Amino acid sequence: MIRKEMIAMLLAGGQGSRLGVLTSSVAKPAVSFGGKYRIIDFPLSNCINSGIDTVGVLTQYQPLRLNTHIGIGIPWDLDRNQGGVTVLPPYESSTNSEWYTGTANAIYQNLNYMESYHPEYVLILSGDHIYKMDYEVMLDFHKQNKADVTIAAMPVPLEEASRFGIVITDEEKRITDFEEKPAHPRSNLASMGIYIFSWQVLKDALIALSDQNGCDFGKHIIPYCHSKGQRLFAYEYNGYWKDVGTLGSYWEANMELVDLIPEFNLYEEFWKIYTNNDIITPQYISADSAIDRSIIGAGTEVYGEVHGSVVGAGVVIGKGSVVRDSIIMKGTVIGDNVTIDKSIVAENSRIGNNCQLGVGEEAPNKLNAEIYSYGLVTIGEDSVIPAGVKIGKNTAISGVTLPEDYPDGILNSGEYIIKAGDRL
């Protein structure tokens, strides 16, 4: 019989709709980050660095890229005969066939998987946060307090607390109450969506709430456990943690990597971030190029200038082109004499010669002003921008676009082009 002290369940099925065209054909945890990684690499690396060798990855929306990236878990040393990494998509049973309808419902549908390891504890993780955390330290805290549930929480500025699920604790960090996005928060300790459950407590709660539509940890499971008088504790975390769920926070987190002294260090020997690397050629930097304060991926060719940007693997930046404060993802080809300012260009896109991205004054986006904001130009993967066009700020483009899509050769600030078949 296989017995594991603690196993991890990694929720990676999110559509990531607030990332707009970046997630039109890929799940949010599979979106590129830092020129080399995908977002899911961070919780996976945290697991293996914390000594957790059994991880179930729950996928749903657009899982192909994620499945291919994870494979059998070799980069994270998770290719094990007993345990390792297992991708857990929704499946058809003899009684029903249903999508995961909520975070807890997804875990409930995989009770048999968890049961097979006879765990003492189950760690619940989200697949879309950028951070480094030693889950073993959190488990020690859980044990010391004889907790039934431990919620990782971090202090946030009180004026921002209403954006989060807030936990209220006593002086021993036992949770006495919690509020979901309160208008007048009584605490500044925000839940990070990272939980350790004692196995029997989790199992009982999932079964008791199995008929709850859209069953969710924050809204249903945690309140249920609290109502049963179980011991809930907050594990306070004070390191770097970023939810990259919006284009603004995603862009900011990437830009922070190229700060002179980055707040989040990708290069620490003692806590490595592992990823599934392609075997590709070295970088080529031409004699005419200029690069400062940037990350440049393997196999990338730079013939122009790159300033304060994160550039993925296998990118080509043509002669006379200037890229500033931007994220250029893997496999993108940028022509000659192109200017790119404060843009996110997704994988395998093509930018024609003499284009200008990020011009003019800001205007609210007409498709979705909440998503396409921050003054960014956002271009979905496999998109094509024809030569000589100008693109304003707070714009979104997805698909193969043609010169006639740009009246007078310009896409004004706040406008968008979403080709047929592409998701908004």
Image: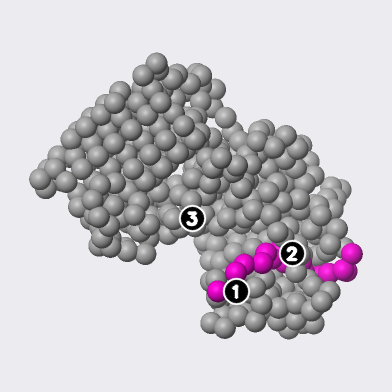
Give me the disc on residue 236: 2
* Residues at marks 3 and 1, CA–CA distance in whole angstroms: 19 Å
Question: Residue 353: where, in percent of width, then height?
Answer: 23, 30
Disc nearest the viewer among 3 and 1: 1
The front one of 94 and 266 is 266
Cα separation, mark 2 vs mark 3, equals: 22 Å
Quarter of the image where one finds residue 173: bottom right
Give the crowd class for mark 2: few <14, some 14-19, many >=20 residues within 10 Å.
Answer: some
Residue 296 seen: yes
Q: Please name the residue shown 70% across and 59% down the image.
A: 238
Q: Give the mark, 3 or 1, whose residue is nearer the N terminus.
A: 1
Disc 3 target residue? 249
User: What stretch of residues is rendered in magenta?
Assistant: 144-159
Looking at numbered disc 1 in the image, what kind of residue is underneath it?
Answer: Leu
Say what amino acid the circle numbered 2 marks.
Answer: Glu
Q: Residues within 10 Å of mark 1 (few under 14, many from 20)?
A: some
The question of residue 149 being in magenta is answered with: yes
Question: Is residue 36 one of those drawn in magenta?
Answer: no
Is 136 situated left or right of 61 in this image? right
Q: Which residue is mark 1?
A: 158
**Cα–Cα gap, marks 1 and 2:** 16 Å
In the image, residue 276 above or below residue 378: above
